[in-house]
Amino acid sequence: MDSFFQQLINGLALGSIYGLIALGYTMVYGVLRFINFAHSDVLMLGAYAAFFLAPKVQQIVPLPGLAGALIVMLLAALICAAAGMLIEFLAYRPLRSRPKLTVLITAIGVSLFIEFTCQHKAVFGAANRAFPKLIDFPNFTFLGLTFTSLNVIIVLVTAALLAGMWFIVQRTRTGAAMRAVSFNQQAAALMGINISRIITFTFGLGSALAAVAGVLYALGAPAIEPLMGTQPGLRAFIAAVVGGIGNLPGAVLGGILLGLLETFAGGIPGLSTYRDAIAFAILILILLFKPAGLLGKATVEKV
Amino acid sequence: MKTGLDPIYKAIASVRLPGAKRWLLVGIALALVASYFSGQFNRYYLGVWMDCGINIILAVSLNLINGHTGQFSLGHAGFMSVGGYTAAKLSLVYSPSVPPEWHPVLLCAGLLLGGLASAVAGFLVGVPSLRLRGDYLAIVTLGFGEIIRVIFQNTEAVGAASGLSGIPKYTTLGWTFGVAAITIYVVAALVNSTYGRGFLAVSDDEVAASSMGINPTRYKVTAFVLGAFFAGIAGALYAHHKQTLTPTQFDFMKSIDIVVMVILGGMGRTGGVILAAIILTWMPEMLRGFADYRMIMYALLIIALMMLRPQGLFALNFKRKGGGAA
């Protein structure tokens, strides 16, 4: 039973990270209706930003420590928000009126470009790098169970960010504009909403979340490398689809579901080697029976 | 007997393109002649040209799915691996007990069996994926490709993660280009037949097509099955050319490579796709000196292409004159 609860919290933490990344996918899909393949690379950029910033921040604020970790995370999020907006401005904006397939292929191209550029020896290099210890995460015991505090931090950060996202989307003017753009872009434009500004803002927000997810992921991972975003990015995308793409709580729900299933399946001897396939198998099953995802609304095609 | 593939046979039988048949014969004859003299070629160039032939088969077969039928599959490498592993296993088991003069027959059996195994996989992927469109379909086919790879990675019978090695070298220039000629012929003849116009109709407008009495589901499955069949054959040729197979050879990047060939050549434009397959096979060889920047340039090529010429670089086509350009 002890190990069951530990697996549960491990799965929750992993799922929270997937959920954070999935939020970015789902928001971008909401306003632009395409899969931003480069999102997983923004996550990697976030981890690298933290990697390079940590020594600088350490000179001012002590590290490892909570305040220092938060500052590093915030700076990484800002850098990635800028990177996300830049990607949108350079690669996606010129293609806004083109067919979706064109944009999708461009997104794959952008993703490959970031990955290969970062693997170049003049940039980050392909080698693994040890991620600095931003924060102490000792194990602690609660109700006779041992937890890693990192996992608890991850779950709490996700919960806080999800609440923040909900507030922005549901309770602010910008959020209302985001929902309007997602509902009907042309009508939103007629109502005086600056579509480009909203899309840029959405990219910035999603990329900032990806950066936070990247830092949290890197804290738990043994090392960082330029392709580190690919696998969690793919899972997170699946999480977004499973939860119903365009739906914020759905993204987190899908992420947690995927994280839990992956963690528990990893514990079953025969299944552990199939871990990479599990997420996709779930995706295919969900799409077969509920093509709009768990929380998504089914749309009827009008001719 | 009425099967789903029935219309294909009918279509192939009713092709009214003597020119295309002539080209097929010319293609096969050229492949055989080239193969006869291949002993005098530089081994390195010979190898790259065989890669070209295999990539032509892959690109033309993916073009049937992504170009002519307007679907978006990102799992072509998965189908290729099914054919490759099937044929390689067959050769590894039977080649010691078969006399050398029967080896081409063994390869032939491997090609057919690999193609069929892959077609079955294509059917299994196609049927559930049909309800999905655009990027959903892309991600599901990507998922199927990954699942196939993980299964091979965990199957001891095909060497798990270390893969198969010591596969006999049966593939020759004649085989690759001969099969490439057949692939081009079948796809071009099919799409240009009366039945095949349905593929273009599904690609142009699914709702309009179904209101005209065309069954989009059936066309999509046919495209998937046939595309997978040829991808499987390409995989079998690849296995007997490289002589080793590992699951990582068939990852997401391989699928992307084939997709890029199709978009560079122009979706649904057979001539352009063939040219793109040849260019993209040679390009990395030419750019060996710039190995560090090669992949960065490749990624930039994709982005630039989508921005400047999304219809593909080469607006060449076979027998699609007047109003039919997709």
Image (cartoon, rainbow, N blue to C red):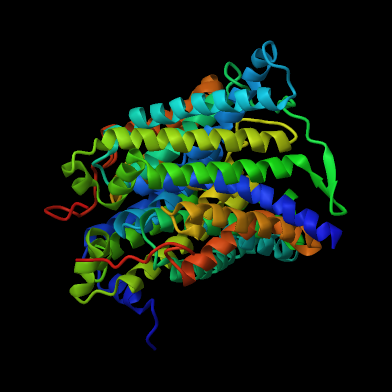
The quadrant in which residue B101 appears is bottom right
Q: Quadrant of the N terminus of chain A?
A: bottom right
Picture layout, residue B107 above or below residue A208: below
- Residue B187 visible in this rendered orientation of the protein: yes
Q: Nearer the viewer, residue B223 or B91?
A: B223
- Residue at the far top in the pictured view: A59
Q: Nearer the viewer, residue B223 or A203?
A: A203
At a point 78% along the width and 30% down the height, the residue shown is A136
In the image, B37: left or right of A9?
left
Instruction: Return the x and y of residue A155 as percentages of the image width and height.
Output: 65, 46
In the image, B89: left or right of A5?
left
Picture layout, residue B10 above or below residue B125: below
- Residue at the far right in the pictured view: A144
Q: Quadrant of the C terminus of chain A?
A: bottom left
In the image, A69: left or right of A266?
left
- Residue B166 visible in this rendered orientation of the protein: no
At a point 26% along the width and 38% down the height, the residue shown is A195
At a point 30% along the width and 32% down the height, the residue shown is A197
Picture layout, residue A48 above or below residue B170: above
- Residue at the far bottom in the pictured view: B1
Instruction: Return the x and y of residue A205 as percentages of the image width and height.
Output: 45, 35
Instruction: Return the x and y of residue B73 as percentages of the image width and height.
Output: 43, 55
- Residue at the far left in the pictured view: B322
Instruction: Return the x and y of residue A260 as percentages of the image width and height.
Output: 67, 57
Q: Nearer the viewer, residue B313 or A290?
A: A290
